[in-house]
Image (cartoon, grey):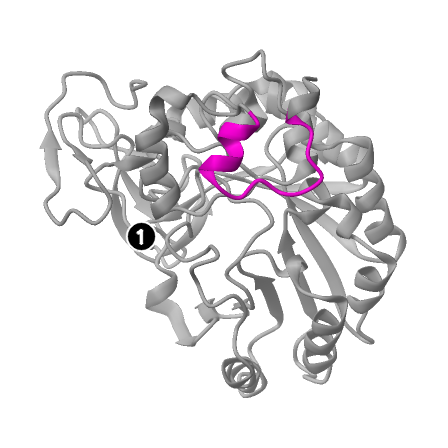
Amino acid sequence: MDCSRKTTTSLKSIDDLVDHRLVDTRERADLDAVGERYAVAITPAMVELINPDDPDDPIARQFVPDVRELDQSPQENADPIGDGLHTKTPGLVHRYPDRVLLKLVDVCPVYCRFCFRREMVGPKQQGQLSDTDTDAALAYIGAHPEIWEVIVTGGDPFVLSARRIRDIVTRLGAIEHVKIIRWHTRVPVVAPDQITVELVDALTAAGKTVYVALHANHPRELTTDARAACRRLIDSGVSMVSQTVLLRGINDNAAALAELMRAFVETGIKPYYLHHGDLAPGTRHFRTTLEHGQAIMRELRGTLSGLAQPTYVLDIPGGHGKVPATAGYVHARTNAPAQFDIEDPDGRQHSYSDCDAPSAIVVHPSIGNDTDQLLNTEGKCHEAN
């Protein structure tokens, strides 16, 4: 690796990326606009993994800003899975009967360019949930005995101090009907040295089962250090599951996903979800088609151990819930290419288009300009820009 790219601190601006030669300076003006709208951060561990000789490096593509993020298609929106519709108190989302999301922070150690909460996270946000809002969220959980599981998310909750994590765990531990505490994080992969003895110890709660859901998308992310960080969690009694997003040009083939899923299992992590890309703003260039994802899953079913099989899922836009992206829930419309009816957990049908509007992309010529332009293009759904 080019030593000029090595760093001991996170890269948090377009200037930092230019200094480390991770972006094309000819696109500097547009990249500044991306950096103004969406948060940027790449940890030293991820910088170290980037291959500077590969223009399609799967690590770089996840974290290095791209000018295509300024293009928003009509069906993309700032809250693609409808968190806002199910928010009961600030930071508390109750979408499913037996579980809630507790969003303690809105910052992350890295910012994925395809993040479905990209409009809600970053250093411009408030940082942590306030004490008042935390109290209200925990009071809501305590008042609803149907809540069996609390999913602690954000942002990335493992950016919190061990003391803060212990406080949350202690307070959840005092709620008798809560049996499962699940933490969603990227930290064991992107900053493995932050999985300290103190943090691991803070996760333990008497009478509760603790899970950590690790988000990783490419087998190269599971380095020796990352696997060691996961083992520290697992050896303490924490169970681990995985979450992966199906990403075009990064892992949208059976070979890459099989290698990743095997790496999870070898590390002691049960593959859990393979997410179809959400309709977050400026992420069109990452999404695949549902048919492509289903074809990959069929290939994995024929070649990969059952221990390593994730469930391919789609979060129905508009807050209608997550369902398997399979024939039982996804119904292709006859004579309507790329158009589907998606059945939600309650049996209701919802229209879903597998591609962005073929001839209309919203273009943001500059951040802060109130007048969006419609750029007419000829091409197929999901054709690379």
Q: Position of residue 161 (x, y in %)?
A: 71, 66
Q: Is residue 270 visible?
A: yes
- Give the quadrant of residue 102: bottom right
Q: Indicate whether residue 40 is drawn in magenta.
A: no
Q: Per the image, is 18 magenta?
A: yes
Residue 260 appears in the rendering: no
Q: Which segment did they paint magenta?
A: 5-20
The amino acid at mark 1 is Ala
Badge 1: residue crowd in 10 Å (few <14, some 14–19, many ≥20):
some
Q: Residue furthest top?
A: 53
x, y percent for residue 170: 74, 79
Decide: is 350 above or below 139.
Answer: above
Depicted 365 relative to depicted 119: above or below: above
Q: Which residue sits at x=49%, y=29%? A: 18
Q: Which element carries disc 1, helix, strand or loop? A: loop
- Which residue corresponds to mark 1? 78
Quarter of the image for residue 267 reads: top right
The answer to whether 314 is drawn above or below residue 258 in the figure is below
Q: Position of residue 295 (x, y in %)?
A: 47, 21
Q: Nearer the viewer, residue 381 or 270?
A: 381
> Considering depth in this image, is 118 or 123 the residue closer to the camera?
123
- Please tell me which residue is depicted at 46% across the width and 25% down the height of the picture: 23
Residue 221 relative to residue 318: left or right: right
Quadrant in the picture for the C terminus: top left
Q: In what quadrant of the picture does the N terminus appear? A: top right
Residue drawn at x 85%, y 45% is 231
Position above or below: 333 against 129: above
